Image (cartoon, grey):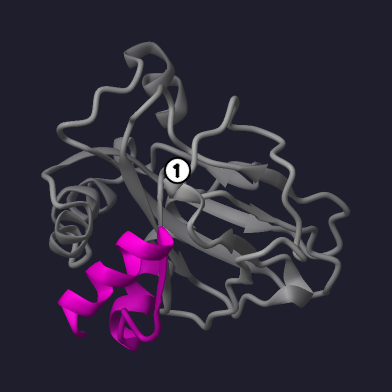
């Protein structure tokens, strides 16, 4: 990886896609640990996996992605949560356009690791490049769609990663296919960022 180029792209666009970030062995381990951790739950979204599985606690604090995110944010990291996401085959609703930052000026990043092939057919993420540089009156239900300038589908394969700034607008559509769209994400605040403590805690649970 050309770290300098990735940093330039992230600063400009507020998002990155890195193919083949995990090798086959690393991907298999991630899928195994995620599957074990979510057993007994019926939710499409499971946050705080680091609290019930020490492996995810280790990954959240010192996984291979941590040094990369420090470089991209030009800051130390304050780990928030390790989470599992699934867009269930046949669902009819997605997630509306939003960004993750809580509190004016708060900074951070999410790295999203695909466990399945993700594309427009099974409800992939969309990013809007450059939106991390803008100010918005609120963070939810923002007026963007797939035709918005700068909007890109995050079409990636298992083991690929997508990374976005906490102020980058993103969303996902419904998974109307018969295919799963599972992923694991790690969310971080930049250590020098000061989000509203109560709301930041709520985000992580």
| Quarter occupied by the N terminus | bottom left
Q: Nearer the viewer, residue 195 or 136?
A: 136
Q: Position of residue 159 (x, y in %)?
A: 41, 79
- Crowdedness of circle 1 by 10 Å Cα count: few (<14), some, many (20+)? many
> Disc 1 marks which residue?
167
38 left or right, relative to 86: left
The answer to whether residue 148 shows anywhere in this view is yes
The answer to whether residue 187 shows anywhere in this view is no
138 left or right, relative to 146: left
Residue 137 vertical placement versus 35 (above, below): above
Residue found 31% across the figure and 38% down from its top: 107
| Residue 25 on the magenta span | yes
Q: Position of residue 155 (x, y in %)?
A: 60, 78
Residue found 62% across the figure and 62% down from its top: 125
Range covered by the magenta-colored residues = 1-30
| Quarter occupied by the C terminus | top left
Quarter of the figure with residue 119: bottom right
């Amino acid at each position: 990886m050309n770290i300098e180029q990735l940093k330039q792209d992230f600063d400009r666009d507020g998002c990155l896609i890195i193919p083949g970030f995990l090798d086959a062995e690393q991907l298999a381990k991630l899928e195994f640990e995620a599957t074990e951790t979510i057993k007994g739950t019926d939710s499409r979204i499971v946050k705080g996996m680091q609290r019930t599985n020490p492996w995810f606690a280790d990954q959240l604090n010192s996984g291979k992605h941590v040094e990369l995110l420090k470089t991209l944010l030009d800051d130390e990291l304050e780990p928030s949560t390790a989470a599992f996401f699934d867009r269930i085959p046949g669902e009819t609703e997605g997630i509306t356009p939003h960004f993750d930052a809580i509190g004016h000026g708060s900074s951070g990043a999410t790295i999203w690791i695909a466990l399945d092939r993700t594309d427009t057919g099974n409800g992939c993420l969309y990013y809007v490049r450059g939106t991390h540089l803008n100010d918005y009156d609120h963070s939810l239900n923002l007026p963007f769609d797939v035709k918005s300038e700068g909007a890109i589908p995050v079409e990636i394969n298992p083991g690929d990663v997508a990374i976005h700034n906490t102020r980058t607008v993103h969303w996902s559509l419904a998974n109307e296919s018969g295919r799963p769209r599972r992923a694991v994400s790690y969310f971080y605040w930049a250590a020098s960022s000061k989000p509203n403590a109560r709301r930041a805690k709520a985000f992580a649970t």
